[in-house]
Amino acid sequence: MSTMNNAVNGLLNTMEKSKSTPWVRGLIQLLALSQSIQLTGWPANYKIQDGERFDFIVVGAGSAGAIVAARLSEVTHWKVLLIEAGGDPPPASVIPSMFATLAHTPYDWDYRAQLDKGTGQAHPNGVLFMARGKMLGGSSSSNYEIYSRGVPADYNEWNQIAPGWDWHTALHYFKKLEGMTDPSVLNDPRNAHLHSANGPVLISRPEPNAYFQEKNEIFLDALEQIGFKRVLENNGPDIFGASRPHFTFANGRRSSTAEAYLRGKNDRLNLRVAKFARAIKILIDPNTNDAYGVRVLLKSGNKINVYANNEVIVSAGSIDSPKLLMLSGIGPKEELQSLGIEVLSDLPVGKNLHDHAISGLTFAGQPGLETALQNVITIAELDSYPVPIQAGFFSLNTSEVNSDNIKPQFQIFNTHMGATAAPILVYGCKTVTNFDAQYCLSAANPNLYREIDMTQVVLLHPKSRGQVKLQSTNPLDDLIIEPGYFRDEDDVITFAEGVKFMTNIARTSYFKKVGGFIAQLDVAGCKGLKWGTDRYWRCYVKNAATSLLHPVGTCAMGPQGVVDERLRVHGISNLRVIDASVMPKITSGNTNAPTMMIGERSSDLIKEDYFGFEFATAQYNDVFSNI
């Protein structure tokens, strides 16, 4: 291996003088990445035995669960078992630019969600694909790596429902997890105090190549022309505005929770990680309602019981955490009884499901095959983001910009593609987001000979709610997932206004100069409506929306929810839920970072419950030597 590394290093040094050439830079990155993923250092697969005992059992090694297990194992006399249904992340997860290849693979739970009749008609049979990570790190190992924390008002609103989750507290834990590497942020006094460079999750914003930078500037300028403020970052003091986003990767590797909290921890003997092990029931004493263990289905097909001296912690995500609770007798009484499940605690498990729906616009830009240069340059971005991307937040209902009580209505992402990428776009449109052929072809058609900008508008705070329900008592059967999009008509009206506002991009200077236009997409259910009218846009968002894959809320915290403010399940002792399902309301932006924050915060809550606040505080002060 050392001989091979020496050869690779020699070739890298030889090519260094020519690194500005795209194909050379791409080869450099490919060779460097081949070294970075050779020795992964993932935790060994622990072969659990029937009847084994641990102090804590954590179900799910995802965005929160991996953090909880790692943090609890800092207490050296606590024996912690982390159960994960998947295995190690593959190279396509580790390499930052390869995220789009993970859907419909063994590393994806590959769920299906059913939209309501008359909604989502651009999706065959009204079905949404809901990718969820099935590996160490969960969806933090498979998502699109955007780092977005939300705004203070999100957490101050949580705090009214579940005290202890205010913005000041949340910021403390964001800084605990965050390893910011962006010098433009760290060197700006207005922003630096909101960040930390010392946490385990590495956050970056690499300098783009010259071509990507040009395309970034063109679209950011267009956003300014329609009223967006250009800001340094979207995780800083400015609630509204546009910038290039931050990412959860650095140094050629995705910074998932598997990477940040589990990799290289094989010397921590009190932390055991059981891979390819699926929790199918929480063991609860029906006489006392005390949780005392977990039933696990092993890869071999054998079922075993493992026992917890202290607590069982469910961190299986917004789909599988409610499923496990309901299979164990915790959930809506009538639903469980209809399946013959003994009800131990009648709680609204699976209710309050909400998500970020997105609706896209395609702006055709400069014509000419020379714009296809981007498709060649992309190979040089293996260790970074594969396309130019910009992000921002806006509202249509307020002039206030810096209040702790203000939340944006919309988030936008824009990605740029050079001409001739249409076949790839059609493939991704159909196989990743499950749009029908007519929609996908109409979206990709302008890209045959023109560059395009694909702008996704996100409805950040929907009023509509869906649910997840058991379809049987078989733990291997998928849940019934009802996203519930647009059950509240106000969401249709608000979303349409946001999308309509973003069409102003087509009237900005660059798009006028190159003869740009908005592609008129072929949306089932909207034929016969005049394009551009209010009726059209309302039909458009209702039928052409898809999911940003941010399901939350199915085990919501609060007195009327499933867990209390310390994430303990109401009516059941020794059982907590710690993941995105506990969010009472969705945050203003991508949900991975808030979920990681929940993992950090709840780990300290557990330590406080056993040792007191001083112990948890002392551990925080020494945290960076532990992880």
Image (tube, grey):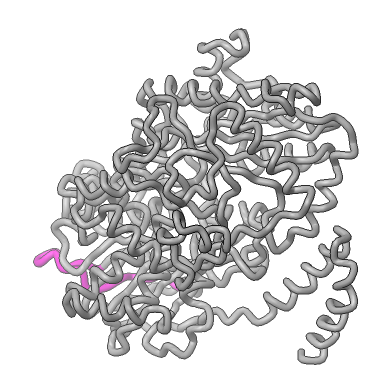
Q: In this view, does 126 lie to the left or right of 553?
A: right
Depth check: give the residue in front, 105 or 407.
407
For residue 254, side relative to residue 299 (left or right): right
Residue under the image location 67 percent in, 24 percent down: 508
Question: Where is residue 45 shown, x and y percent of the image?
Answer: 50, 81
For the N terminus, the quadrant is bottom right
Evaluate whether residue 135 shows in this view.
no
Q: What stretch is highlighted in magenta?
A: 283-298
Specify whether residue 500 is in view: yes
Q: Which of 626 and 400 is in front in this view?
A: 400
Instruction: Please identify the quarter of the rendering in which residue 615 is found.
Output: bottom left
State the residue at coordinates (19%, 46%).
160
Q: Which residue lies at the image location 85% right of the left edge and 58% below the top edge?
A: 22
Residue 525 pos. (x, y %): 57, 17
Inspect the magenta stretch and tell me whether residue 1 lies in it: no
> Could you tell me what secondary structure mostly forms the magenta stretch?
strand
Q: Quadrant of the C terminus?
A: bottom left
Closer to us: 122 or 330: 122
For residue 103, above or below residue 250: above
Magenta includes 297? yes
Image position, residue 189 (x, y; %)? 46, 58
Decide: is 566 above or below 615: above
**Residue 450 in the image: above or below residue 624:** above
